[in-house]
Structures are given as structure tokens and as C-alpha cells.
């Protein structure tokens, strides 16, 4: 019998009149049913959250941190149970799925500790006129109110925890919307918050199809802050609907790996393959194109090809490197990029093969800038090699992208690397390593269409708080 999951609202587990069936991408088997909330049920979630806000924000950081540490302990205890479901629901290798849960626990613990370090300040006047020297400002950070946290399918637990924990430690209340494919994993995360005993209404879940309630939950006037990870088109739509309300958007990327003549090619190839094909390329920070100097291109391409051919292909329960993509629509899009590159003359160095949603890893050499693969984000296991004649050409191609998330530079000339990094229009540049999200205390951000706002635990807490000054005169 298919398992029925419930939403967690105002301290209670609730069903809805309608449900959504969740299927395993790899096998097509039914995994469970999740509620399809109505707009009226969303109204109740938001009303419950706002009712709980006053008492939650009145707690000390120490009291709020204690709740979060309990959540983290529960996640560590249940990591294998949650990971097993997560693996099936989003076709992620079992070990990676368990690691995602453990990393989420670590983020929650860190957010709890970082909250204890949040400080206000006292400012003295005196900048403009003599009278102002007698003015004192006590500056404090206060919660923004109700945070709507929306996580993506590829990291439905981790990229939920990284939003929820900073919001809660700052004194906000949360409405958490997991992705449709990823809802069960999100509700298992919610079980940890429920067991930890947070006051009713402080943390709530909303499940349902984005096409049916997505606009409603975002446009709702009860929402004070929107924290979203997902595609750029949806992020842009959220930005327009948000109006004057603050937002944090983590969107798409077309991350470049720039390889100079003096690079350690073995190290470079290892990082590029890990970065490009981890979780079948379904990561915003995946290496999505290689810009390599012509002089070392042949050697690098062969090393990359050897490592791509060694990748395992199969199902998530077998911890395969390459597993089925999240759905047929995603696989169709990737196949379209592959076909376009092939038709326009790119050399495929691995077999082009698809079985259902499973696309075998494809390495293309001699990709040119008239091909879609040079510019569009595949979110799948395909990597283009673009040969360039100069560093200036590599920088120009990298910067022509509408995205600006991350980039990598592979070289042993660090002063030169820093000079290149300054010219790249991205949020983060990695030296001699793959593009990647971590570590979670570092700032994480994107330029251009890759996002808005700065993440990383400390930065997320700051983003989901507002500054209030209390000014008085001294005699």
C-alpha cells in the first residue's frame, strides 16, 4: 500500500482533500502520496506562523539554538532512514543521499552556534555638528517575520536546512515549500523539527504543485522574505512578484573551468570530471564547460575522456556515478543539446546513448560558440570542451554568459590566477579545484542571472534580519 504523508502545520500533521503521487525516477514505482494544499490551507499556514512569531522572536538566541541542536541530533540519528528515501525520490546515489542529510545536520548546528555570535553595536554621534556628539544609537538586528523557504529537487533536504536554520535562529517563523519531486524528503526533514518540539506555528510545511499554488504562496501579503533555489526563469518570476519584499535567489549557472598551459593536467582532469558529472550534472555549481588553451587541449581531453569512461552508470541504490535524470522533460532537454552539438560538428568522444531518463555521460570536444551547449545549462551529464587561443578569449567567452555563478582556474601561476579571477563576472572563483557550493560558512552568491543575495550561514542570518536603531540624547 502506498504510504500517505502529511503536512506539518501549526504543530499538527494534516491531510488535504487532494494528493499528489510521487514516483521514483529510476524505476517508476510509486513512492508515496503527499498533500496537494489548497489556497485556503496556505492561508491557515501563514496565519498560524504569524500567530507564533511574537513568542518565538522573544526567545533568546540560546533558547532558539537549543531547539536547532535537537533537530540536528535527530537528523544525524535518522540519516540512513531519510537518505534511503531521498535516494529513491530524486535518483541520487545512496551514500550521497545519506551525506546530504548529515551535512544538513551540520549546517543546522553551525547556524545555531552562529546565532549566538550575532552582535549589535552602539554608535556615537559627532560626524556633522557639535550637537550630534550627544547622540547615541543602539543598533540591533531583528527578524523580518515570516520566511518562505523553497528548496529544489536536487538537494531537497540540504538546501532546505540552509534556509530554515538561519531563519529560525534569527527569530523568524518559517513556511517550507519542498519541490514536488522531493516533497517526501522535505516532509521527513519536517519530522525532525516536529520531534524537536518547536512551538506550534514556528515551522510549517506547504506541499503542492508549483503550477497550482506557486504564485499564491509567493504573492501572499503575509510573506516577509522569500528564499528560493531553482531555475532562473522561475526565480525571475518570483523577483517580479516579490515587489518591495526582500528575496534571496539561488538560480542557474554555466560554470567555466579555464585551463592554462602550466596546469597540472591530472589534477585538472580529476576535478573537472568530478565537477561536471557528480549527481549526473544536476547541480547549479557543476562544471558546465571547459575553456582550455589550445597547446594543452589534446592532453587534457584524453585525460578527461579516460576518467569519463570509468564512470559507473546505473541506479541510485547501486551508488552509480550516473543515474537517471529527475524526469523525462529534463532528459529530453539534455538530448536536444547533445543533438544540436553533434549536428553542428562537435566531436563526441564517448557514446551518445539514452535509455528512458538515463543519459550516458557525453564528452564533446571542439565545441564552438554557435552551439547551444556553449551557453545553455544542461543540468545533465554532458560536458563541452571549447578550445581557446588566449586567456583573453577564455575570459570573454566565460563573461558572455547570461549566468555568473562560479568559475574555476587551473594554473600554477597564482598571481596570474588572481588577475584572471578579478576579471570574471561570477560570485566565486575556485583555484585548482572544481566549482562547488561549500563550505557553508563561506559566502555563496551569483552575479547576473545566477541569483540575488548572499548565502552562507552568517550571511543568510544577516539577510533574514533587519536593522533597527534606537537613538537617544545624553546629557
Image (cartoon, rainbow, N blue to C red):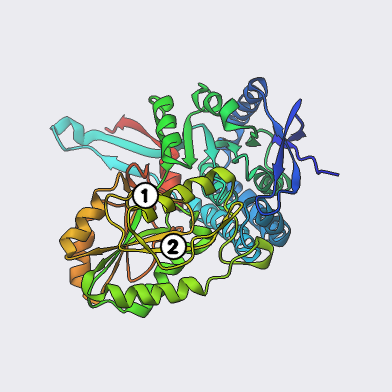
Q: Which residue sits at x=20%, y=54%?
A: 396
Q: In which quarter of the image is the N terminus?
A: top right
Q: Which mark is residue 392?
A: none
Mark toward the start of the polypeptide (2 vs 1): 2
Farthest residue, direction right? 1
Query: Is residue 321 among what the camera can see?
Result: yes
Secondary structure beneath disc 1? loop
Res 468 quadrant in image:
top left
Q: Nearer the viewer, residue 366 or 223?
A: 366
Which residue is under mark 1? Answer: 445
- In the rendered image, residue 205, in percent from the top left (x then y), is placed at 65, 36
Question: Relative to 395, does residue 28 appear above or below in the rendering?
Answer: above
- In the rendered image, residue 255, in percent from the top left (x then y), is placed at 35, 56
Q: In which quarter of the image is the C terminus?
A: top left
Marks 2, 1: nearer the viewer: 2
Question: Relative to 260, does residue 106 appear above or below in the rendering?
Answer: above
Q: Which residue sits at x=82%, y=43%?
A: 2
Query: Is residue 443 among what the camera can see?
Result: no
Q: Which of 413 and 353 is in front in this view?
A: 353
**Drawn side of residue 308 relative to residue 6, left or right:** left
Mark-to-mark CA distance, 2 and 1: 19 Å
Which residue is under mark 2? Answer: 276
Q: Which of 397 and 370 is in front in this view?
A: 370
Amino acid at each position: 500500500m502506498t504510504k500517505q504523508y502529511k503536512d506539518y502545520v501549526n504543530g499538527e500533521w494534516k491531510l488535504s482533500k487532494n494528493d499528489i503521487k510521487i514516483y521514483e525516477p529510476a524505476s517508476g514505482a510509486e513512492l508515496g502520496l503527499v498533500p496537494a494544499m489548497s489556497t485556503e490551507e496556505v492561508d491557515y499556514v501563514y496565519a498560524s506562523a504569524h500567530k507564533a512569531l511574537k513568542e518565538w522572536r522573544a526567545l533568546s538566541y540560546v533558547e532558539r539554538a537549543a531547539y536547532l541542536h535537537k533537530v540536528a541530533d535527530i537528523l544525524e540519528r535518522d540519516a540512513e532512514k531519510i537518505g534511503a528515501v531521498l535516494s529513491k525520490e530524486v535518483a541520487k546515489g545512496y551514500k550521497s543521499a545519506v551525506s546530504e542529510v548529515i551535512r544538513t545536520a551540520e549546517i543546522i548546528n553551525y547556524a545555531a552556534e552562529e546565532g549566538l555570535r550575532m552582535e549589535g553595536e552602539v554608535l556615537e554621534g559627532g560626524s556633522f555638528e557639535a550637537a550630534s556628539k550627544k547622540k547615541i544609537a543602539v543598533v540591533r538586528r531583528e527578524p523580518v517575520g515570516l520566511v518562505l523557504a523553497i528548496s529544489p529537487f536536487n538537494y531537497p533536504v540540504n538546501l532546505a536546512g540552509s534556509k530554515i536554520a538561519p531563519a529560525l535562529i534569527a527569530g523568524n517563523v518559517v513556511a517550507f515549500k519542498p519541490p514536488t519531486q522531493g516533497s517526501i524528503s522535505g516532509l521527513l526533514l519536517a519530522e525532525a523539527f516536529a520531534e524537536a518540539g518547536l512551538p506550534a506555528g514556528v515551522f510549517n510545511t506547504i506541499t503542492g504543485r508549483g503550477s497550482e499554488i506557486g504564485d499564491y504562496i509567493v504573492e501572499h501579503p503575509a510573506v516577509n522574505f522569500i528564499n528560493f533555489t531553482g531555475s532562473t526563469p522561475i526565480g525571475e518570476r518570483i523577483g517580479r512578484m516579490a515587489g518591495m519584499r526582500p528575496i534571496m535567489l539561488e538560480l542557474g549557472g554555466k560554470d567555466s573551468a579555464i585551463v592554462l598551459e602550466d596546469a597540472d593536467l591530472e589534477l585538472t582532469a580529476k576535478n573537472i570530471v568530478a565537477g561536471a558529472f557528480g549527481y549526473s550534472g544536476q547541480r547549479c555549481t557543476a562544471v558546465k564547460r571547459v575553456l582550455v588553451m589550445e597547446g594543452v587541449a589534446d592532453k587534457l581531453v584524453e585525460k578527461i575522456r579516460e576518467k569519463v569512461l570509468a564512470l559507473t552508470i546505473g541506479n541510485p541504490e547501486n551508488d552509480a556515478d550516473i543515474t537517471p535524470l529527475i524526469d523525462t522533460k529534463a532528459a529530453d532537454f539534455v538530448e536536444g543539446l547533445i543533438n544540436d552539438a553533434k549536428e553542428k560538428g562537435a566531436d563526441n568522444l564517448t557514446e551518445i546513448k539514452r535509455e528512458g531518463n538515463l543519459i550516458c555521460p557525453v564528452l564533446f570536444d571542439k565545441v564552438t560558440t554557435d552551439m547551444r551547449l556553449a551557453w545553455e545549462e544542461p543540468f545533465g551529464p554532458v560536458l563541452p570542451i571549447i578550445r581557446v587561443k588566449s586567456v583573453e578569449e577564455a575570459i570573454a567567452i566565460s563573461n558572455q554568459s547570461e549566468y555568473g555563478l562560479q568559475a574555476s582556474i587551473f594554473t600554477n601561476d597564482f598571481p596570474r590566477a588572481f588577475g584572471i579571477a578579478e576579471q570574471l563576472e561570477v560570485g566565486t572563483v575556485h583555484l585548482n579545484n572544481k566549482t562547488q557550493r561549500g563550505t557553508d560558512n563561506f559566502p555563496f552568491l551569483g552575479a547576473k542571472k545566477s541569483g540575488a543575495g548572499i548565502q552562507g550561514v552568517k550571511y543568510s542570518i544577516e539577510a533574514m534580519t533587519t536593522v533597527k536603531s534606537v537613538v537617544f540624547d545624553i546629557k
